[in-house]
Amino acid sequence: MEPMEVSVTDEEYMMQKAKSFLETDCYRCRSWLLTAKSMFPSNFGIHFECYEIEKNLRCVQRAARCFSCLLEDFPNEPILWKEIENFTPILCMDTSSLSEEQTFFRKMFSALPLSIQQKLLSVCAERSEDTMEHCRLVLLLLNRFPQSSTELALKLMDTMITAEKHNQCPNVINCYRKILVCDLGPLLVSTSTLNQKNLYKMLTKTTEFYITYAMGGHSIIQNLPDTENYIKTPWEDLFASCERIGKKLSWELRSVLSQSDKRKAWKKVSSFAKKFVIASNNSELSKQLVFCGMILFVRHVFDYNKSLKIENGSEYLLVKAIKGPKVQINKPPLKQAVLSIATKLNESLIGITDESSEVLDHFKMAFNYWELLTNKEPMCTDYWKLSAQIKVDTFIGQFLNDIEFYQGKYKNLFKAVSVNESIRKSLSLVTLYYCVQEFKKCTEHIFKVVEQIENLNLYGSVSTEIANPPEDREMYFIQIAKLPVLQYCVKIMTQILYNQLSNYPSTSDILIGHILVLSQMVWPEGKVIAEDMYNHIGKLSLFTYPQFSAYITNIDIIEHFMAMFMENDKCVLNVFPCVASSLSPRISTRGAGKGVKEEFQLALKKQVTRWSEPIDETMLLFFKNERESLMKTATLMEKSLTF
C-alpha cells in the first residue's frame, strides 16, 4: 500500500524550505522568506516566522524591522501580544541581571522606531493587569519620552498612592512608595508643570518616606529587585528631593538643607523665621520654614540618637546633676515645678561626663529647632499638622523624653522607662526617684544598678563632672560604663546620708563612717567631704565604726586617722575590732597606754598596704554588705521630708 500524500499549502511549503536552510545557509533561508512575504503579504504566520528566525539568529536590527511590521500590519494577533507580554517586563529589569535572550529583547526594543516604542509602552501599560508592572511601564514611557503628557504622570502618581492603600502596606516603606518617591518624583518635578497642591503632596510623601526609612532603621524594601530594595544615602536623597521641589516653589530656604555648616544653617533658619514668618504671619512662608526646619530638626535628632550609642557598645543617659553633698534636700513642693516649654536652652545647665561633645552638640541643635517650631505661630500649628501626617513623634521619643527631663517634668517620665530589665532602666529610675525625692525607691534601684554593673564590659573612668559639677549645672549625660555609673550612685547615696546626718546627728557614727567610705570614690573632690567628717568625729568622745578596716583604703584618710589618734585625746577611735579591747584604759588615761598606740599603729600600717586595691571593687563590696543600713537611712530621710 502506497503512503498517503499529505496536502501542503504553498505558504507552508515555502516556510519549510526556508527553515531547511536555517542552520546551513541563512541567506537562502531569508530569500525564501522574502519570496513568501511578497507572495502572501497578508499571512501573519509567514511574517511572524520571519521575526522568529531573525530572533533565533540574534539579528537585532532585522528582528526589530520584522517586529515593527507585525505591529503595524497585525496589531490584534493574540500570538503577537503573547510575545509582547513575554518581553515587556524585561524592559523594566536591571541590565546587570539579564540573560542573553533578555539582553537581545532590550536591544531589539531600542532598535524599534521611537513612535513604535512609545505606542508599545503605552498599550502594554494599559493592558497590564499587574499594578507594579503597569507602574513600571508608564514610568519607562515617561523616562524615554519626557514629552508625554503631565496628565499621564499625575495619573501614575495617583495610581501608586491608591495601590499603596489598597495593598494594605504596613508602613510607608514599600515598593509603591519607593518608586513614587525615588523614580517618579524627580521626573515629575523636573519635566512637568505641577501645581502647588501636587508639589506639596509630593513633598509630603517624599519627606515621610525618607524620614521613616532613615529613622526607623529600615534596610530592605520588600518586593523589589536586589539592586533597588535599599537606599544608600536617605538623608542626602531627601535633601536633594526637597531642594528640587523647593526650587519649583521658589523657596528661599531650600539651600539650608545641603548646608554643611550646621550653625550657619540654623542662623539662616532662625533669621528667616524672625524676619519674615513671625513678623508677617505669612502662611506660605511658614510652610517653607516648617518643612525645612522639621527636616533639619529630625536630622539632628537622628544624629543625637546615634551619638547616644557609642562604638564600643556603651551609651549615654541624661541624668540629674548631684550637687553637694552640702546641698540641703528640702521638702518636695506640692506642685511639680517645671521650666516653661518656651524656655530657651541654657547651655550651662547641661553637661557630659567625658570629653565627647557630639551628644551635647546634637542635643542643642535639635532643641533649637524644636523650640522654634513648637513655640511660635504660625509655625506651631503648621508643624503639628505636618508632624502628625509624617508621624514624626514615632521617631523622636528619646529626644522628647530628654526635653521633658530638661524641663523638670520628672513624673511624666516614669511611664516612658523601658519595661525590659537593664542597667539603663535601673539608672533611669535611680535619677527619677531622686528627682521626686522618693529616696527609698531610689536606693532600691541603686542596689539593682550595683547588681547589674558587674556585667558591664566597659570600665570607663571617673568623672569630674559627676564628682564636682559646676554650680549652675542641673543635668549631664552619663556614659553607661562601670566607673561613672558607680560614681554617680555613690554621689547620690552620699547626699542622702549627708542630709540624714544633718537631720539626725544622734545616729552619726554609722553615717560618718559610710560617708567617709563613699568619699573615696570621688577623690580628690571627696577630700572636702572627708574633712567635714573629721570635724564631726572631733566633736565626739567615742567614734565607733568597725567597718573601717573592710572599706577604707585611701591613704589620705588613713593618715588623718593616725594623726587624730596621736593628737586628739578627747575622742576614742573604735575602728579596729582587734584594738577595741584596749580602748577602755585609754579613755581613762587619755592615751597614756603605749601598747594601745602600737596596736593601733600596726593596724593602720596593715590598712595602708591595701592602698592599691581597685576602689570600684571596694564600693561594690560596701553596697553589698551595708544594704540594710543604707536602706534604713534612705527610708528615714524620705519620712523626714513628709512631715
Image (cartoon, grey):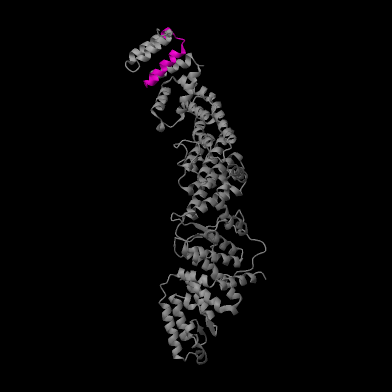
Is 536 left or right of 412, judged from the image as shown? Answer: left
- x, y percentage for residue 30? 36, 13
- Residue toward you, 579 or 589: 579
**Was residue 240 drawn as part of the magenta stretch in this picture?**
no
From the viewer's perspective, is residue 24 above or below residue 418?
above
View extreme (left): residue? 24
Q: In this view, does 603 lie above or below 190?
A: below
Image coordinates for residue 585, horizontal then vertical, percent: 50, 91
Please tell me which residue is depicted at 48% across the width and 43% down the height of the picture. Answer: 219
Which residues are drawn in magenta?
Answer: 37-61
Tell me if residue 59 can be seen.
no
Give the farthest residue toward the front. Answer: 1
For residue 64, above or below residue 228? above
Please say whether residue 94 is visible from this viewpoint: yes
Instruction: Say if the magenta span includes residue 57.
Output: yes
* Residue at screen point 51% across, 27% down: 138
Q: Can you say whether 384 is above or below 639 in the image?
A: above
Asked whether 251 or 584 is in front, the reply is 584
The image position of residue 529, as x and y in percent, is 51, 74
- Image coords of residue 156 (percent x, y): 55, 29
